[in-house]
Amino acid sequence: QVQLVESGGGLVQAGGSLRLSCAASGRTFSNHAMGWFRQAPGKEREFVAAISWSGGSTYYADSVKGRFTISRDNAKNTVYLQMNSLKPEDTAVYYCAAALGRVGVHLAYYQYDYWGQGTQVTVSS
């Protein structure tokens, strides 16, 4: 069992920055590939970024590439999403997810085994 708790969401003006955190507990964090997804009202959940268990591999959706950075600190059992140059279209609930024992990075929601409760990010124009 893995518990994931996101934090760091909030209201920010366009062009601003936020840093999301996802704290994990339960099974060995360093064995999990991690990802961030988001869901805007009336839209399907979409992939944002992913990171391998070691942090050596990352992957981003085209819509956030160059603006968002995913990272992890296995000593702190935490994965981060640094979001810069935020746009109103980034407004969504952001979820972190864990893919247990998987190698590499993963883009599909069905590849993830555990999900956090989500944190709201609102970007005003």
Image (cartoon, grey):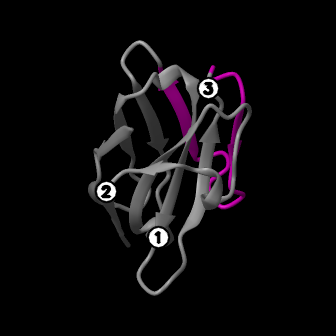
Query: Which residue does the numbered mark 3 point to in the structure image?
Result: 53
Question: Could you say whether the residue bearing mark 1 is in a helix, strand or loop?
Answer: strand
Q: Which residue is farthest front?
A: 1
**Residue plotted at (35% across, 29% down):** 26
- 125 lies above or below 105: below
**Residue plotted at (46% across, 70% down):** 39
Query: Which residue does the numbered mark 1 point to in the structure image?
Result: 39
Q: Quadrant of residue 109?
A: bottom right
Q: Quadrant of residue 52?
A: top right
Residue 117, label in figure:
2
> Magenta span covers which residues?
54-73
Distance CA(mark 1)–CA(mark 3): 24 Å
The disc labelled 3 sits on which kind of residue?
Trp
Depth order, front residue of 69/72: 72
Percent from the top left, x then y, of residue 24?
36, 32
Q: Residues within 10 Å of mark 2 (few under 14, many from 20)?
A: some
